[in-house]
Image (cartoon, grey):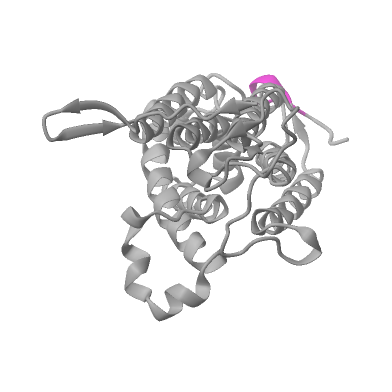
Amino acid sequence: MLLYPHIDPVALQIGPLAVHWYGLTYLAAFGLFLLLGNLRLRHEPYASLQGSAAWTRKDVEDILFLGVLGVVAGGRLGYCLFYKPGYYATHPLEILYIWQGGMSFHGGLLGVIASMVWFARSRHRPWLQVADFVAPCVPTGLAAGRVGNFINGELWGRFADASLPWAMVFPQSGSMQPRHPSQVYQFLLEGVLLFVVLWLYARRPRRQGEVAAAFLVGYGVLRFVAEFFREPDNFLGILSLGMSMGQWLCLPMVAAGVWMYLRAQSAPLPVARGVVVAGR
C-alpha cells in the first residue's frame, strides 16, 4: 500500500502572495474549456450556422463566464440545501461564507443549467443547442478539480484491502488504514473516460439534446459507481438503501438524461452541412 505524499497546497509563494495548487487547477479547467469550446466551433451543426445564428469565440468566452457564476452560486446553494439544510436554515448568513468550504457538484450543475438558459434566451438560441455545445467541454474541468482534491488530500475513499497495489493511507483522514484513492478514480471515470466518450460521440451528427443527455447519463452512472469507493460525508454517512447522498442525487440526473434522449428521438437526424434525413 502507498502513503499519501503530503503536497504543499501552496504552489508558489511570492512575499505575501500565495498561489495555491487548487486555484491553478481551476485555471486549467477554464483554459481547457476555452480550448475545447473553440474546437467545438468546427463541429456540426455549429460550423454550418450562419448569420445571427452563427457561433463565435466570444460566445465561448461568455458561456465560460456565466458558467463560472453558475458553478459558484449553484454549487454553494446545492451544498447548503442537499447536505446541511437544517444547519443553514438556522444560520442563513453562513450560506455566503464560501471560504469555509462546502460545494456540491449537483448544485453546480443546476447553476450551470440556469446560466445556459440565460445565455440561450439572451442570444435567441435553442437551449438544447447550447447544452449540446457545452457538454463535451465539461469533463476535463471535472478532471482538473479531482486533481485539486488529491493535492489537497480531501475527499478520500473508503477503507480498502491492504493487498490492493494502489491502496493509500491518508493520515489526514484520522486513520492509518489503507483507503481507495477515490479522487483518482473520479479523475479517470468522470474526467478522462467521460471526456473521450462524449467528445467522440459529439463528433457525429446527433439529434438536438442527445449529447447533453449523454452527459447526464454518463456522469450520473460513473459518479454512482465511484461513490461506492468514496468515503461519504461523516455528518451524513450512508443513507437509505445503502446509498450515499451523491448516489441519490445521481438518480434524478440519470432519469433526466434518459428522458431527454428519448424525447430527442422524435426529431430528424441531421447530417453534414444542414442536410437532414428522416428520423429513425
Q: Residue at x 81, y 63 (%)?
A: 241
> Between residues 206 and 36, which one lies in front from this camera angle?
36
Q: Which percent across, then down, holds residue 260?
A: 73, 49
Q: Which percent across, then down, holds residue 33?
A: 46, 29
Q: Is residue 273 magenta?
A: yes
**Residue furthest right as drawn:** 280
Q: Is residue 142 left or right of residue 250?
A: left
The quarter of the picture where residue 213 lies is top right
Q: Residue at x 66, y 25 (%)?
A: 166
Q: Residue at x 58, y 57 (%)?
A: 233
Q: Is residue 177 above or below residue 204?
A: below
> Between residues 64 and 87, which one lies in front from this camera angle?
87
Q: Is residue 206 above or below residue 39?
A: below
**Residue furthest bottom as drawn:** 90
Q: How many labels sit on residues? A: 0
> Between residues 21 and 67, which one lies in front from this camera angle?
21
**Residue furthest front as drawn:** 176
Looking at the rendering, the stretch of residues picked out in magenta corresponds to: 271-276
The quarter of the picture where residue 188 lies is top right
Q: Which percent across, then down, holds residue 34?
A: 42, 26
Q: Which quadrant of the figure contains the N terminus?
A: top right
Q: Which percent across, then down, holds residue 120?
A: 48, 47
Q: Which quadrant of the figure contains the C terminus?
A: top right
Q: Is residue 49 left or right of residue 99?
A: right
Q: Is residue 277 left or right of residue 138?
A: right
Q: Is residue 261 magenta?
A: no
